[in-house]
Image: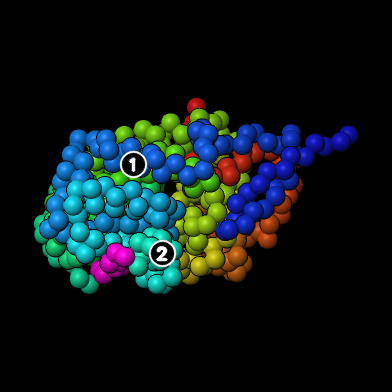
Amino acid sequence: MTTNIKTIPVAFGSGIFELSIPDKNISSIILPSEPETKGERTCLIKKALENPIKSKRLSEIVNPDSRIAIIVSDVTRPTPTDKILPPLLEELYLGGANRKNITIVFALGLHRLQTEEECRRLVGKEVFESIRCIQHDRERCRHIGDTSFGTPVEIFEEVLDSDLIISTGTLEFHYYAGYGGGGKAILPGVSSEKAILSFHSFYSKVFEGAPLSGRNDSPARQNIEEASKIAGLGFMLNVVINSKKEIVAATAGDFIAAHRKGAEYVDAMYKVPVEPADAVIVSCGGFPKDINLYQATKSLENAIPAVKKGGSIVLVAECSEGIGDRVYERWNSECKTPCEAVEKFRECFEFGGHKAAIVGKAAKEFKLYLVSKLPEAESRNAFFIPAKSVEEALEKILSDNPEAKIHVMPNGGWTLPVKR
């Protein structure tokens, strides 16, 4: 009897794997409901800036003396900052803003410093050479208050010293904050290490509860927005991108109201009802979503609702920069079992260790495979079964259960399956 084989392209870093899977084993290909696009739609950004939500236009807010800080994403995010900045700057110039008074700030959070070439590529050559661009410095933050969650609001002084703070970014699902974007550019984006660690420490109290991804009422989102109000975030411009990293929606204005509108776009496109299957093969969607294992675990979490308990998850993530966090790497070495990682996290929050606990929690419920460039020992330390290819992982799943029904998620970094 002939077995019909389906070939599905799966992103891996900046390249593509071709996954060959028997038709009879495919439960579904979980894809977002993306609108048709014809190349970049920067006109959506201009339209959003001309029709801000619960806010005046930027051109009505600024004047020639306004000192302006524009917060932008770092290299770990897929934000098309080079497409966002030209219409944003045009709107500021329309109000008389002086480019000498504008500073672009890369929101690093606790991430590494970027190279000059990375900074230039992110904002575009012309902007990089005409506007002052600096990177967030966790050592140069001022304390200006505290949120009701007890998180100190300690913000990079270059941001605080401006008359107008503008946040930019990509609106997408986030495992802890519900969604990215909005005030997340402030906390953790340009906050002190103490503030960021305080912000993340609450995750140890909620990580074993109901999933928070795709929810606006998460404690982290509330904490973010309290901190952003205290910091004086004056305006936001966020985009929603598709799996090709093209802009498909944009919202601007009040950083809460405009964020909620953007979340509606994300939900409509990326929440996909599913029946849990025996296994799921999930790609992060390629670079930069799979730049390291720290970032790739977000796609692992997104895939969990699509799998029956006891099933298998195959995470396809290049991890060209390795684990991506020293603490996460240390926890992987120190915690010998998934249970040990979860128990340790319950007792002692340590930023970076939360990733070991997240994967440990998943490894207690599912069989986890990892297709990556990590050494096999590192994959095993992180509670994954290493596989050299997607086919190798698939063979192992089918050898255990030849009739297994399998979901394929080509865009795990963006897509959120929701149980029917």
Indicate which disc, 1 or 2, sits on the residue closer to the N terminus. 1
Asked if residue 63 lies left or right of residue 395, the reply is: left
Q: Position of residue 291 (x, y in %)?
A: 50, 61
Between 14 and 23, the one nearer to me in the picture: 14
Task: Report if residue 316 lies within the magenta region.
Answer: no
**Three-letter residue code for mark 2:** Lys
Q: Residues within 10 Å of mark 1 (few under 14, many from 20)?
A: some
CA distance separating discs 1 and 2: 21 Å
* Disc 1 to disc 2: CB gap under 8 Å: no
Q: Quadrant of residue 309?
A: top right
Q: Which residue is mark 2?
A: 125
The circle on residue 310 is none
Q: Where 156 falls versus 222 (above or below)?
A: below
The disc at residue 46 is 1
Which amino acid, mark 1? Lys
> Who's the residue at 24% across and 41% down the image?
253
Q: Vertical placement of 208 versus 217: above or below?
A: below
Q: What residue is drawn where x is 39% and y is 34%?
A: 265
Q: Residue at point 66% right, 47% down?
A: 9
Pick the front one: 194 or 245: 245
Q: Position of residue 388 (x, y in %)?
A: 68, 61
The residue sitting at 45% across, 57% down in the picture is 295
| Viewer can see residue 183 | no
Give x and y (percent) for residue 268. 43, 31
* Above or below, comparing residue 376 to residue 176 in the picture: below
Location of the N terminus (image quadrant): top right
Q: Which residues are magenta?
A: 130-138
Residue 214 is left or right of residue 18, and the answer is left
